[in-house]
Image (cartoon, helix red, strand yellow):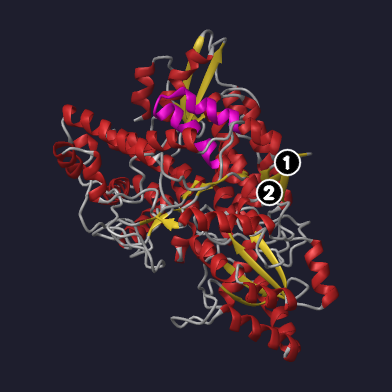
């Protein structure tokens, strides 16, 4: 019966008339290409139609791994009656938020301003033909239920208001646009952002943590990598312990994929048991770096294993043939959350004998009733177990550990035969840049050279696919490019180039980092007040917003503070120093009163407080000779800024005595260096 139903649906889709999304490259947009809604992509054709026909615009924003986006698509956008009304009275635009984060940020900010801060996806915002917002919401069922208005009623209400209250709508849309453009991120007089500020902020962040289940919040619960990395640098043992306990809990929880490696997006509950099963490239990158920090601090093999497995997941599951990395993997398979990842105890009893199952139950929490629930699905799967570790591999004796690895391999192989979640194969520039930085660093911390090779290959491919005449493009797929010159892409590419320089001493990477930094100052920096806009001055969007706070990804301004701090410490970059000082002054009030908004910026300030530089003078040394010194440098926490002694580094480093053979290492603070050495053991002691 199910097979016949599937064939019937596919047949209908085959004969359905496609809408204007049919030639788009985004997998998310393609999902909507055969719906009865006459969807347009973001572009002049849709705007011209709205102006000509004097119709409001429905801008519906989502992404391919968004659960409620799929729900609303099935319920409302595939509903013939709703689609007919929408097509008659509105111009409908579908947007992939990952392909155009600049547009999404503008209208999500507007939605939050109109709805007292609430937000989420799908985002459904109604605009004037001039692209100015006047009403917004998120998920709507087709008919009213559970205190939510029905989408059918909402469309009729908006249409009536557009016809009968046009003047009020126009005035409101003008006012909300002006309000958002004028809203400052925060400003204050310059004051100390040194050790006392950092120590106080670490204390505030720790105090707000969950003392029972670790991390922050009560659910949904997201990995907060900036806060974790910040606390790992603390001089207070209790603050470091909280970060390590959080990472231990997360690495054992449902957030982590124990069979395949890699992290899911978040957990819906306080206890980190039930994840939302989507996997995002940017989460993997940030969590790799965080677990590397934890491993360097403790030398605990658990953190090493989690970082390694996540790197291997990226190379095995998320890497395209040309070396770059896909955006995400879906949470659902066969329209069911958890169907790919969960197990019933009855199923496991069919696979393993009683002795094997008993060992597996020591390792994972497995029960008859299961621990998985999905309140969003009235027909959710029953008795399913999310794999949650109660006793880690490292806690078993060698013989048991070997047997467990075989049992896990069996589960992995069986699961691989299930219907796989879809992969969003867009190549996003800033997400890839974060992965490149993480892999390059992991190469030395984990002493796995293939990770650096993968990072360099991905970076080279990005330059080929996402750069045109010096301009960066955010998204590329099927020879289509989207999102020209976004601040997040520049900031992340500076980070990737600089990290590759620290891991290779190839000066071309440092030169590129400086080039992208100077271009960023021209495109995004507010020369009057400080801070960074998210789009360039030539943007044709309805408004130009400054970067205000970190989210799942570090904000543009947090990343630029990190990169300008690093680059001005090792190169002559006066315009970067001025921009850095002005930006920190501008964000002074936010840093002091709302540190949770800018965790990555505070992490950058903390790293700079303790940062040393490790200058390596190389004379006719091949990579094999250089690698041990790069490894020693990268295996310190906090890691020193590793650089060579040739341009474009500061003149001070260029004037250090050159090595006559091999490598000579200079560990410096400011313009004061310890005695030069070529002895790796001496260098290790200097770095402690």
Residue 100: quarter of image: bottom right
Q: From the image, which quarter does the C terminus lie in?
A: top left
- Report the front residue among 307 and 609: 307
Q: Residues within 10 Å of mark 1 (few under 14, many from 20)?
A: few
Q: Could you tell me which secondary element the residue under label 2 belongs to?
A: loop
Q: Residues within 10 Å of mark 2 (few under 14, many from 20)?
A: many
- Report the front residue among 305 and 161: 161
Q: Position of residue 141 (x, y in %)?
A: 52, 75
Relative to residue 44, is residue 636 depicted above or below? above
- Report the front residue among 502 and 295: 295
Residue range highlighted in magenta: 434-458
Q: Residue at x 79, y 72 (%)?
A: 50
Q: Which mark is residue 25?
A: 2
Q: Main secondary structure of the magenta part?
A: helix
Query: Is residue 307 highlighted in magenta?
Result: no
Q: Residue 188: in sight, yes or no?
A: no
Q: Residue at x 76, y 57 (%)?
A: 537
Q: Position of residue 620 (x, y in %)?
A: 57, 9
Q: Pointers 1 and 2 in contact (CB under 8 A)? A: yes
Residue most extreme to the top = 661
Left or right relative to 500: residue 211: left
Relative to residue 67, is residue 110 depicted above or below? below
The Cα atoms of the two marked residues, 1 and 2, are separated by 8 Å
Of label 1 and label 2, which has the lower sequence position?
Answer: 2
Query: Is residue 449 highlighted in magenta?
Result: yes
Q: Which residue is mark 1?
A: 479
Q: Could you tell me which secondary element the residue under label 1 belongs to?
A: loop
Q: Residue at x 69, y 49 (%)?
A: 521
Q: Position of residue 330 (x, y in %)?
A: 49, 51
Left or right relative to 371: residue 13: right
């Amino acid at each position: 019966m199910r097979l016949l139903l599937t064939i019937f649906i596919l047949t209908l889709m085959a004969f359905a008339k496609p809408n204007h999304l049919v030639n788009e490259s985004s997998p998310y947009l393609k999902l909507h290409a055969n719906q009865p809604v006459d969807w347009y992509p973001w572009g002049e054709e849709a705007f011209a139609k709205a102006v000509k026909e004097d119709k409001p615009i429905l801008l519906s924003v989502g992404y391919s791994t968004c659960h409620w986006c799929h729900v609303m698509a099935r319920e409302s956008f595939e509903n013939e009656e709703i689609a007919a009304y929408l097509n008659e009275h509105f111009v409908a635009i579908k947007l992939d938020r990952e392909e155009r984060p600049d547009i999404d940020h503008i209208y999500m900010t507007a939605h939050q301003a109109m709805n007292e801060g609430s937000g989420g996806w799908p985002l459904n915002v109604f605009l004037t033909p001039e692209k100015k917002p006047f009403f917004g919401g998120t998920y709507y069922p087709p008919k009213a239920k559970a205190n939510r208005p029905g989408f059918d009623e909402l469309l009729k209400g908006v249409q009536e208001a557009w016809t009968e209250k046009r003047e009020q709508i126009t005035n409101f849309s003008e006012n909300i646009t002006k309000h958002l453009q004028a809203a400052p991120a925060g400003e204050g007089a310059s004051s100390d952002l040194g050790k006392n500020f950092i120590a106080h902020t670490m204390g505030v962040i720790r105090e707000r943590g969950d003392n029972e289940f670790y991390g922050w919040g009560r659910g949904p619960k997201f990995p907060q990598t900036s806060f974790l990395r910040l606390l790992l640098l603390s001089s207070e043992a209790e603050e470091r312990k909280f970060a390590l306990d959080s990472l231990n809990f997360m690495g054992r929880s449902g957030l982590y994929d124990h069979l395949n490696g890699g992290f899911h997006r978040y957990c819906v509950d306080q206890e980190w048991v039930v994840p939302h099963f989507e996997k995002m490239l940017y989460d993997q990158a940030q969590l790799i770096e965080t677990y590397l920090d934890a491993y360097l601090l403790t030398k605990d093999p658990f953190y090493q294993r989690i970082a390694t497995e996540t790197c291997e997941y990226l190379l095995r599951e998320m890497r395209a043939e040309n070396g770059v990395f896909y955006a995400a993997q879906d949470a659902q398979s066969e329209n069911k959350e958890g169907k790919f990842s969960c197990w019933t105890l009855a199923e496991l009893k069919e696979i393993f004998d009683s002795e094997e199952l008993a060992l597996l139950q020591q390792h994972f929490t497995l029960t008859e009733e299961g621990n998985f629930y999905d309140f969003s699905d009235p027909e959710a799967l029953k008795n399913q177990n999310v794999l949650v570790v109660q006793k880690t591999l490292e806690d078993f004796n060698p013989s048991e550990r070997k047997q467990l690895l075989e049992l896990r391999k069996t589960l992995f192989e069986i699961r691989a035969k299930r219907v796989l979640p879809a992969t969003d194969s867009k190549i996003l520039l800033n997400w890839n840049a974060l992965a490149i930085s993480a892999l390059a660093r992991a190469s030395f911390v984990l002493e796995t050279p293939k990770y650096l090779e993968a990072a360099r290959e991905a970076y080279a491919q990005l330059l080929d696919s996402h750069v045109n005449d010096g301009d960066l493009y955010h998204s590329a797929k099927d020879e289509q490019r989207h999102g020209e010159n976004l601040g997040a892409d520049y900031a992340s590419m500076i980070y990737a180039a600089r990290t590759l320089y620290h891991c290779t001493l190839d000066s071309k990477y440092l030169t590129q980092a400086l080039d992208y930094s100077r271009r960023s100052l021209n495109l995004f920096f507010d020369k009057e007040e400080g801070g960074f806009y998210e789009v360039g001055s030539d943007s044709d969007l309805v408004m130009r917003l400054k970067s205000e706070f970190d989210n799942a990804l570090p904000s543009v301004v947090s990343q630029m503070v990190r990169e300008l701090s690093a680059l001005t410490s090792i190169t002559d970059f006066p315009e970067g120093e001025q921009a850095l000082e002005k930006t920190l002054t501008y964000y002074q009030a936010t840093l002091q009163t709302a540190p949770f908004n800018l965790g990555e910026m505070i992490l950058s300030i903390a790293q700079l407080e303790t940062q040393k530089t490790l200058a390596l003078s190389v004379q006719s040394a091949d990579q094999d000779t250089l690698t041990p010194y790069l490894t020693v440098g990268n295996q310190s926490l906090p890691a020193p800024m590793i650089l060579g002694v040739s341009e474009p580094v500061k003149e001070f480093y260029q004037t250090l005595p050159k090595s006559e053979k091999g490598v000579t290492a200079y560990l410096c603070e400011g313009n004061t260096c310890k005695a030069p050495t070529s002895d790796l053991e001496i260098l290790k002691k200097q770095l402690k």
